[in-house]
Image: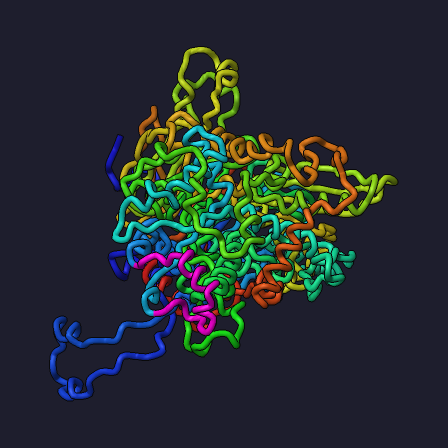
């Protein structure tokens, strides 16, 4: 008990998760003969001679385990790197979609869904998706516009003078899509989800159907944004009580992945694992999102279609790999390509094979760069979920006004829609950054649970904060202060110039992010939301029609009917609580032992 | 000035042992900011409040935490009520309230015998028993691992907490028992051992297993690290600010041009750090105008105290009255240092102050009649009061 009487080396720090604690199911069998001689001295060499089968611990095991969550996450993140992109490009011959399409038209492959035979068995179809925040980061770095940054990325990933200029097969990405396409779908469905949770009628999904199928069990209000993987991981590990509030919608990255894998595998008659989808994202945690089992083909593939029994196939991710803006530059560098020298003009589209679905082709590859309200300054830097929901609600209430109140810091904002007579119709909030998330989750904690944390305590002075009504219908939650343009994977200002502060730099990235909406707003087909940077005003230009263009609903219906997969399976996902022990439950044995041992080796606590 | 570890003519003499002690090990004893009261936290999940005047047990905080209570702090600036924040290995921080009732004064004035202090007193006001108890007000959750230290800002509206999860959190009391997280500071690379607010400025110091000390201030609407104090070669167990000099003394004094912080470490050193005031001759009023966007501050290691410990130094106290520093640690010694003309020497030391037990904590406390004492808290559960 006393260091004076005990060991010399005192070290109180027991790292919470250096070692994997997952019990390995198949313990290595030892050769019984070798244990015969009880008196034999075992040497180091003999120990290593025993050949143990390698322990098999899957990534899903890791995600579900609390023992070394952080080290498991580190592994997941490191498995998706720019090197992994190059390795994959070099490991497989490319599948030429034009050839598959021709064969499909000829009817030659009608009988099989196993691709076109042995020739392409090992082949891969490479597709990429790029987030607008990454384009903004590149734009700020090279002082180009967001659109030009997009062209540079297209050239790197898809042109002959890009990645295809090197490597074993000279491979490159056949299609490069903008995640803003599917973001529009998430905005429309996200607003529907809020309508549904408030019991407001949903618009029909398509002109031909009167019903919107997405009416089953909406999340509990307030609905919280679920597109931020950092926030989701934290909530699942630490605050299971908020899981019922999470929007069930997939993120734009996940939805893009599902779209590409479902449509391409069906139209081209190849297996999902033959399509390799890389997403370029502003955020490292998107790699964790890509690793979620909920975002693999086992959640959507039709059970009847696979000729191989589903149980023997391992899940195929909808997004196989995520790299960040910084890693994109490393990717170019590793291939010996000067990123800033890449052309700032559109790719030669005659080189690109037609996307094997004309409806989706015009949706994914619009003739001019997509102008989206999501990148309006009032929508923030994280995709504009809240902004779209507010304009949807405003459209429901003529003469209503929107009041914006800044919270205790720049990352907290309150939004209230008031009727003309002043009654409050709708409340929403924006909470960015870990510290503000703390205050949100505390308020959402059920009062009972809050009190039970101090079971034997004397009379509580008052009940938990949960008693204070949380009238929000929706809260846009992002883990990064400043939102997604400030993601951890973005190029840092200090990488570019020494004299630029982090704040100034973020301002420049934001400016690039919003530049598209300013440049293109003239020709916008749907009405823009009002700016919410003032104290109180109504959104101008409110239109009679729903703020979302009906084309999105048509596209979603087309996607579902043409693939034969219900839209719920395509667009929705789920969450699960990941048990974390520390400070949560009474870890009877292990915890006490650790305490005891630590106490013994010194007063380090 | 001297490297001698032998005690000078001054000695550290035992006044009393606080009774009844915890039967489990005790971590820390926090002195009340104005009254002759101390609160001792123990691994038996209790905090015991003692009167220094009578050396006896007055009240107990219990029933809240699931694991050892590692740390506690009295909220400053209150009248009529006492508030204690507790930090536990169960990863939570508790806030506890108790009506003052002048209980300590009443008891110390009466100087009653021991049996009066464990329950309701002879007046039999059992109906008001609850008023004599510590009431659990709120639990602050957020840390993911053991809480190691808590500290109230001078104004009492901010509470800093730190944990083995490597983070420092700042909480603000928005109203009665309504706390909001205002900052989560995650720059430390190891277990954060100690947090301490400057006695006047909104300046927070934290020390860690990563051997660093970090200083934090609010910048616009977020908290940021303004300086990293590097020099210790092992875990920095504790940090303690120098008291703020009275203004008359402060303006005339040229010896201490910057605010100072003391730190103690597993490397067996105690270091004094000093802020270099922003250079430039003109008076301070101009500096604030010139102040650039950068919030960085320049801090230097001012001096090291004479080496007197042979094991890890767990705790230090810097007297706000006399400017003396007291230290203790794994070697079971209590050492008092005195500064003269910017040079530190050992004033007195006591070897084996708690027998063979390690001493986890030491602090200065007021006896009430202008007398300052040292309170030491040992691994074996004993808490002793010393005079110098």
Whether residue A284 is visible here, answered yes or no, is no
Which residue is painted at 30% across and 34% down in the image? Answer: B304
A313 inside magenta stretch: no
Instruction: Name the dominant secondary structure of the magenta segment.
Output: loop
Residue B112, how many percent across, how many down? Answer: 61, 55
Q: Residue furthest right?
A: A421
Q: In the displayed structure, would residue A395 be above or below residue A119?
A: above
Residue A64, how many percent across, how many down? Answer: 46, 67
Which residue is painted at 51% across and 32% down in the image? Answer: A512
Residue A146, how many percent across, how many down? Answer: 49, 34
Q: In the displayed structure, would residue A263 be above or below residue B327?
A: below
**The C terminus of chain A appears in which quarter of the rendering?**
bottom left
Which residue is painted at 43% across and 65% down in the image? Answer: A270
Which residues, given as a range, are shown in magenta?
Answer: A92-117
**The N terminus of chain A appears in which quarter of the rendering?**
bottom left
Q: Residue furthest front?
A: A106
Near-viewer residue (A60 or A159): A159
Q: In the displayed structure, would residue B57 be above or below residue B304?
A: below
Whether residue A133 is visible here, answered yes or no, is yes
Residue A449, how many percent across, how many down? Answer: 64, 63
Q: In the displayed structure, would residue A21 be above or below residue B369?
A: below
């Amino acid at each position: 008990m006393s260091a004076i009487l005990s060991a010399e080396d005192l070290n109180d720090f027991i790292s919470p998760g250096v070692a994997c604690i997952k019990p390995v199911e198949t313990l290595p069998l030892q050769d019984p003969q070798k244990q015969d001689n009880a008196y034999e001295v075992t040497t180091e060499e003999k120990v290593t001679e025993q050949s143990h089968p390698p322990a098999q611990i899957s990534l899903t095991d890791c995600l579900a385990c609390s023992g070394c969550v952080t080290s498991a996450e580190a592994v997941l993140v490191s498995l998706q790197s720019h090197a992994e992109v190059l390795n994959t490009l070099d490991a497989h011959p490319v599948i030429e979609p034009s050839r598959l399409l021709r064969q499909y038209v000829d009817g030659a492959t009608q009988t099989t869904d196993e691709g076109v035979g042995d020739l392409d068995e090992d082949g891969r179809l490479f597709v990429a998706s790029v987030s607008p925040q990454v384009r903004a980061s590149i734009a700020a770095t090279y002082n180009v516009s967001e659109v030009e940054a997009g062209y540079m990325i297209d050239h790197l990933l898809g042109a002959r003078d890009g990645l295809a200029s090197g490597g074993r097969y000279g491979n490159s990405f056949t299609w490069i899509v903008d995640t803003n396409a599917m973001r529009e779908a998430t905005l429309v469905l996200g607003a529907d989800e809020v309508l549904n949770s408030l019991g407001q009628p949903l618009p029909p999904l398509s002109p031909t159907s009167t019903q919107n199928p997405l009416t089953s069990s909406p999340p509990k209000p307030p609905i919280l944004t679920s597109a931020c993987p950092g926030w989701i991981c934290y909530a699942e590990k630490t605050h299971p009580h908020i899981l019922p509030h999470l929007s069930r919608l997939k993120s734009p990255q996940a939805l893009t992945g599902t779209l590409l894998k479902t449509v391409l595998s069906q139209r081209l008659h190849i297996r999902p694992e033959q399509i390799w989808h890389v997403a370029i994202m502003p955020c490292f945690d998107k790699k964790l999102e890509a690793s979620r089992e909920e975002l693999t083909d086992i959640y959507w593939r039709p059970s009847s279609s696979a000729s191989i029994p589903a149980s023997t196939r391992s899940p195929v991710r909808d997004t196989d790999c995520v790299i960040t803006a910084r890693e994109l530059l490393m990717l170019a560098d590793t291939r010996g390509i000067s990123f800033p020298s890449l052309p700032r003009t559109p790719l030669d589209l005659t080189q690109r094979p037609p996307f094997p679905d004309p409806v989706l082709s015009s949706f994914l590859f619009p003739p001019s760069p997509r102008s989206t309200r999501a990148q309006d300054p009032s929508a923030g830097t994280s995709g504009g979920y809240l902004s779209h929901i507010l304009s949807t609600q405003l459209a429901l209430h003529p003469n209503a006004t929107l009041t914006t109140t800044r919270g205790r810091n720049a990352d907290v904002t309150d939004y209230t829609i008031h009727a003309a007579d002043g009654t409050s119709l709708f409340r929403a909030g924006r909470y960015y950054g870990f510290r503000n998330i703390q205050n949100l989750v505390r308020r959402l904690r059920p009062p009972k649970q809050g009190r039970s944390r101090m079971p034997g305590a004397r009379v509580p002075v008052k009940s938990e904060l949960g008693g204070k009504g949380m009238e929000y219908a929706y809260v846009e939650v992002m883990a990064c202060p400043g939102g997604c343009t400030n993601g951890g994977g973005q190029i840092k200002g200090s990488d570019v110039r020494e004299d630029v502060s982090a704040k100034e730099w973020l301002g420049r990235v934001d400016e690039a992010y919003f530049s598209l909406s300013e440049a293109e707003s003239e020709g916008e087909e749907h009405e823009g939301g009002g700016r919410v940077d003032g104290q109180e005003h109504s959104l101008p230009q409110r239109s009679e029609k729903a703020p979302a263009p009906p084309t999105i609903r048509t596209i979603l219906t087309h996607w579902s009917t043409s693939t034969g997969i219900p839209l719920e399976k395509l667009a929705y996902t789920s969450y699960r609580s990941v048990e974390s022990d520390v400070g949560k439950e009474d870890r009877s044995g292990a915890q006490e032992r650790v305490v005891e041992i630590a106490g013994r080796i010194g007063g380090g606590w | 000035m001297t490297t001698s570890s032998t005690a000078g003519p001054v000695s550290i003499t035992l006044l009393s042992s606080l009774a009844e002690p915890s039967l489990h090990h005790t971590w820390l004893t926090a002195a009340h900011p104005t009254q002759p009261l101390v609160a001792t936290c123990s691994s038996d999940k209790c905090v015991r409040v003692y009167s220094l005047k009578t050396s006896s047990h007055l009240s107990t905080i219990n029933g809240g935490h699931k694991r050892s209570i590692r740390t506690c702090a009295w909220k400053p600036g209150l009248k009529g009520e006492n508030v204690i924040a507790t930090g536990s290995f169960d990863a939570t921080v508790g806030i506890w309230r108790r009506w003052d009732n002048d209980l300590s004064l009443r008891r110390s004035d009466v100087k009653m015998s021991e049996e009066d202090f464990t329950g309701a007193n002879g007046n039999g006001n059992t109906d008001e028993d609850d008023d004599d108890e510590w009431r659990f007000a709120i639990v602050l959750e957020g840390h993911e691992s053991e809480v190691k230290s808590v500290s109230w800002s001078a104004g009492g509206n901010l509470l800093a907490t730190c944990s083995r999860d490597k983070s420092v959190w700042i909480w603000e009391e928005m109203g009665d028992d309504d706390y909001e997280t205002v900052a989560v500071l995650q720059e430390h690379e190891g277990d954060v051992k100690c947090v301490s607010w400057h006695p006047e400025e909104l300046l927070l110091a934290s020390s860690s297993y990563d051997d660093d000390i970090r200083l934090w201030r609010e910048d616009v609407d977020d908290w940021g690290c303004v300086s990293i104090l590097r020099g210790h070669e092992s875990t920095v167990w504790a940090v303690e600010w120098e008291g703020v000099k009275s203004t008359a003394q402060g303006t005339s004094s040229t010896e201490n041009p910057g605010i100072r912080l003391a730190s103690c470490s597993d490397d067996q050193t105690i270091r004094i750090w000093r802020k270099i005031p922003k250079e430039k001759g003109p008076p301070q009023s101009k500096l604030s105008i010139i102040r650039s966007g950068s919030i960085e501050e320049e801090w230097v290691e001012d001096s090291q105290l004479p080496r007197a410990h042979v094991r890890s130094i767990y705790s230090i106290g810097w007297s706000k009255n006399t400017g003396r520093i007291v230290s203790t640690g794994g070697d079971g010694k209590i050492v008092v240092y005195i500064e003269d003309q910017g040079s530190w020497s050992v004033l007195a030391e006591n070897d084996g102050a708690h027998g063979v037990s390690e001493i986890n904590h030491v602090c200065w406390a007021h006896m009430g009649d202008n007398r300052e004492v040292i309170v030491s808290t040992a691994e074996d559960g004993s808490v002793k009061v010393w005079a110098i």
